[in-house]
Amino acid sequence: MNNNRRDFLCLGAGALAAGMLPSSLLWASPQAQRVQAVVIGGGLAGLSAARNLVNLGVKSVVVLESRDRVGGRTINLPLPGGHVVEGGGEWIGPGQDRIAALAAEVGVGTFDAYYTGDGIYDIQGLVSKGLLPELGVQQGYDFSRLAWRLQSMADKLPLGSPWQAVNAKSLDNITLAAWLKNEGASKWVIDAFRIITRAVMSGYPERISLLWFLHYIQSSGGLLGIALNDNGLQDLRFVGGSQMISINAAKELGNRVHIGEPVESIDDKSAGPIEIRTHKGMYLADRVVVAMAPADTLRINFKSGLTAQRDELVQKWAGLTRLPLIKHSVIYNKPFWRDAGLNGNVVTDHAPLQLVFDNSPPDASIGVLTAFLSAAEVPAMASKPDRIRLVPLELSRYFGSKALVSTGYAEKDWSTDQWSIGCITPLTKGILTSAGSALRDPVGRIHWAGTESAEIGCGYMDGAVRSGERAATEVHRALQT
């Protein structure tokens, strides 16, 4: 047995032992396999594309996934008692019907996220409890006024193509923070938007293009949806964790899915099939779907060359300043905060923990508080041992001494992920208007998918599924000509 095959089987066996994939997916690529379509990326976008291609009657489809697992930016982390907590994408809400439909089709159910009781708010040094933070009449009016303005502006954009708006350049040449300041926003309102953008986009208003922000809220169904938990886009969770959707979809696709096989190069020659090379061999395809975040495609050598606009998009996306995000969950014997009438949510404008959620399993047999943080903002928590020690200490500020008595932890540090340049993207000024259309425009016989390219649900799991469905339709149509 050669070294490549032995290494791959060892890698696959580890995934099998972890219960992530069936043995049918532990398949070694031949040297030159001829197929109709190759999908690059085994996340929700790629698996949705492959699944739809198969359903549309495309006879030969291969999915090439770099990681030793499927799921992309969704990943289940094991908890005691056979439970899991998500290390990446997790919640869905109203209007996100494509991810909901896919989950149902592959046998993954949902349950209500826990929001019974009071949330805790720590904003400008004022700690309050309730459904909303404690604020004055003027603060409430100012926030509502500017939120309405932003929503009105977003509603006027061409859905999914904000760069086509008549005033696109002016909106793209100013940051959200600058716009808020120009509109007379108070410090409280600016801090409130900092909380929203840090939580949703892993970035600050000072760096985020106003056009991108407007596109993001329009694509997601509105500012209210991304800001709310209960009845918003954090409304439901998946039974068994969100990664189960990809795991079950991959099982359906069987040996079409090849894990642990990163693509090294793509050559879309003027004549003959497209050549896709990996360290295990070569695939010859009529069409290719690249289902990856734009910056992550830098790992692939596009030998035939990309359009100048696509290259600009990728280069600028890769150079963005982003907060390296860590999703850290602390485990307890039970969700003790519920006994005190708290729902486990903490929203703050300054503490080391960006957001805190109750992520306990549906049977509440154990308690889990999940916190988002960035080591760039809190150097004291840069190392895992320090986080294990300091996160419960920080939680005790809000939940009392019981928060110190944890039984374990689970975390995903996206800044150290080999295959993702960040988990969430805050797009800065100028990129959408100069290269936005390259998010979806095919280059030759190469098509693009990924949540960032979605017209609806951009940045969310629903957008990833929709982008895969769109790319599959494009490929199927092209194969018919």
Image: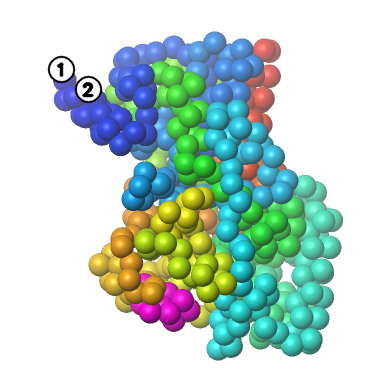
Residue 47 placed where, x, y %? 52, 30
- Residue at image mark 1: 1
Q: Residue 5 carries which label?
A: 2
C-beta proximity under 8 Å, tags 2 and 1: yes
Residue at horizontal 37 percent and vertical 29 percent from the top: 21
Residue 144 placed where, x, y %? 79, 74
Residue 326 placed where, x, y %? 41, 61
Name the amino acid, label 2: Arg
Residue 428 placed where, x, y %? 59, 63
Comparing 82 with 273, the one in front is 82
Quadrant in the picture for residue 407: bottom left
Above or below 266: residue 100? below
Residue 7 is one of the magenta-drawn residues: no
Look at the magenta stretch and give its main secondary structure: helix
Cα gap from disc 2 to disc 1, whole angstroms: 7 Å
Residue at horizontal 79 percent and vertical 86 percent from the top: 137
Comparing 324 with 435, the one in front is 324
- Figure quadrant of the C terminus: top right
Q: Residue 9 carries which label?
A: none
Span shown in magenta: 392-401
Few, some or many C-alpha atoms within 10 Å of disc 2 (few <14, some 14-19, many ≥20)? some
Is residue 430 found left or right of 44 in the rendered image? right
Where disc 1 sits, the SS reads loop
Is residue 390 found left or right of 366 in the rendered image? left
